[in-house]
Amino acid sequence: MGFNYERPYEKRIAETMETAPDSWKEQFWDCVKDLAEHPVVLRMKLYPHHGNSTCYQHCLNVAYHNYCLCRFLRLDYVSAARGGMIHDLFLYDWHTHAAQTGDHFHGLTHPAAALKNAKKFFELNRIERDCIINHMWPVTPLQIPRTKEGWIITLTDKYCGARETSVRG
Ligand SMILES: [Fe+2]
Ligand SMILES: [Fe+2]
C-alpha cells in the first residue's frame, strides 16, 4: 500500500487495515489501484490538505472508509471506493488558492473542479459522480447526494478530515 509509518495518521490507517480481513484489503487495493497510481491522481501528493495529510492521503483514507462501510452495508463499495479516491481531485493548494485566484469559496466550488478534472481522465458512473459532486453536503446545501454511497461519503469525508486535522507530528 505504500503507507508512510513515520506519519501518525497513515500509521493509524495502516493499523486499521491490519485488522481488516486479508481478502478485503487486497480487494480494496484492486478497486482503486488504477486510480491511485495514475499520474494525475498522484499529483494530489503535492498539495497539503487537513493537518499533516496531503490531498492524496485524505482521498485514500476516504476511499478506504467508503469501501469498508459500503461493503458492510452491502452497497456498491467498488464505486464508493473509486469515487472516494478522486473526490478531491481539484489539484491546487486550497490554503493559497484564494490569494492566487480570488476564489474565496473553495469549500463550495471544489467539488465541481474535482468532477471536471475526474471526467477529463476517467470514465465515471452515476455513483462515482455523485460521490464527487455532492460530498460536501450540507456545506453545499443545493448539492444533495442522490445515492446511498453519496450519503456515505458525506460522513466519511468529514470523519477522515476531522481525524487528519487532529493528528499532528
Ligand atoms: Fe472536498
Ligand atoms: Fe475530502
Image: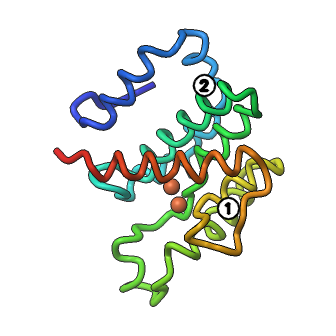
Q: Amino acid at mark 1?
A: Asn
SS label for mark 1: loop
Residue that lies at the very extreme toward the top in this rendered image? 22
- Residue 125 image position (x, y, % from top left): 82, 47
Can residue 82 be seen here? The reply is: yes
Q: Quadrant of the C terminus?
A: top left
Q: Earlier in the sequence, mark 1 or mark 2?
A: 2
Which residue has dot 1 on it?
134
Q: Residue 9's quadrant in the figure? A: top left
Is residue 40 rendered to the left or right of residue 19? Answer: right
Is residue 146 rendered to the left or right of residue 92? Answer: right
Is residue 136 rendered to the left or right of residue 61? Answer: right
Whether the residue under disc 2 has CB within 8 Å of ligand 2: no
Q: Residue at x 41, y 52 (%)?
A: 161
Image mark for residue 28: 2
Q: Residue at x 73, y 58 (%)?
A: 145
Instruction: Please determine whether, in this image, residue 77 is positioned above or below residue 155.
Output: above
Return the residue nearer the eye: 109 or 65.
65
